[in-house]
Amino acid sequence: MIVVKAHKKYSRYLFLLLQSLVLAFLAPPLFSAQDDTVKVNHVTIAPVIDGIGEDACWENAGWQTIDQVWINYGEFIDPSDYSGRYKMVWSSGENLLYFLVETTDDAAIGGFVEGQTADVYNYDIAEVFIDENNSGGPHINDNTQTGENAENAFAYHIYADFPDEGGVTYEHWVGDIPGPHTEHLPGFALRKTGDVYTREFSLKVYDENYDDTDPEASRVMLTKDKVMGLSVAYCDNDEEDGQRDNFFGSVWVPEANYNNHWMNADDFGTVRLQSELIPGSVKGNQSESTIEIYPNPASDYIQVKVNEAASKLEIVDLSGNTRSVFFLHGTEKQRISVSHLIQGIYYTRITADDTSFRVEKFLVL
Ligand SMILES: [Ca+2]
Ligand SMILES: [Ca+2]
Ligand SMILES: [Ca+2]
Ligand SMILES: [Ca+2]
């Protein structure tokens, strides 16, 4: 009876018992973890990395829960304190994995001290653990005293400052042990809507020959039916006291291994890349704004016309990186240079009133 151990006060126990009975009727299982093998859909059009999970590619991806309490092991956590879930898809065209991580958290402790090596987990952090060849085993440091096989798997700790209410941030820092690996997540967005935080990001995959001096040499080409070890976790801090409150994972682990993921891949979950091609289209939010772009394809410049007052236009590449930002002046037609962009597909993202987006695709030749 984990509940009895964790909550000795009788009244608290009675409350939890009643709550559990109610939730048992109303909600899906509380302790469900991710699927034994998460089936990851292929997408032809990658999501726009903006912290809004309304892209067509997310519609057919099922939610996986991040609800296993690793620290303190097995403790009951009120859903208003924390709840979390994630989706993932993959793109052969971009050769990237994409994640949508949605957490509810009653207190946001953002940030990261660059170069800090101790107590790095004392922030609200999303984490992705990935073992490209599903080998399991240790993956820390290459040091006989503290561990070995550092590149056998990666433990990405994803830090960000929290945006203001309704806002979004694209800045992030990613650390593993050893070393910073921010560039392994080429696109990242974190959006705040009340107590709900949506992280949308892309991830490059490397094999165990990874070398920081030449990452691309060990970059893995993602293919259908590929099986990888993978778990997602969330480190919840609710006070500026330098103490981690709780740590949640998407897979069950034995109590003896309650905090092993960061150094050993044996307990990682499993994902399989599916071959299905999900027809995708990019869509923005409910805004009725439209944008005309021509010529398309373009080489030197595009002309842009929006039908409502918008403040900003961004040109975004397929990895979700913003390549250019322009400030708009009303609904007048504007000429925007694209001669600096290499050949490929780009999106325009329009911002009006900080919240409205309309995304259109164009090709640079
Ligand atoms: Ca999106
Ligand atoms: Ca919390
Ligand atoms: Ca491995
Ligand atoms: Ca928190």
Image (cartoon, helix red, strand yellow):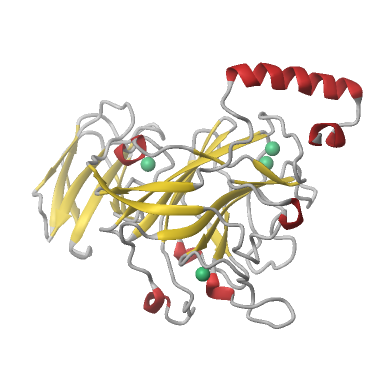
* Residue that appears at 37% across and 60% down: 226
* Residue that appears at 59% across and 72% down: 179
Q: Is residue 316 left or right of residue 169?
A: left
In x, y percent, where is residue 294? 10, 46
Kindly indicate the quadrant of the structure image that contains residue 47.
Answer: top left
Kindly indicate the quadrant of the structure image that contains residue 108.
Answer: top right
Q: Is residue 157 left or right of residue 349?
A: right
* 121 or 14, nearer to the observer: 14
* Residue that appears at 59% across and 17% down: 26
Is 136 rendered above or below residue 324? below
* 172 or 266, nearer to the observer: 266
* Residue that appears at 80% across and 48% down: 241
Is 132 rendered above or below residue 28? below
In x, y percent, where is residue 304? 17, 43
In x, y percent, where is residue 16? 77, 23
**Residue farthest right in this picture:** 9
Is 315 rendered above or below residue 215? above
Q: Would residue 102 be seen by someone viewing this image from the given angle? A: no
Kindly indicate the quadrant of the structure image that contains residue 281.
Answer: top left
Q: Is residue 1 left or right of residue 354?
A: right
Quadrant of the image containing the N terminus: top right
In x, y percent, where is residue 308? 25, 29
Q: Is residue 72 left or right of residue 356?
A: right
Quadrant of the image containing the C terminus: bottom left
Q: Would residue 254 be seen by someone viewing this image from the given angle? A: yes
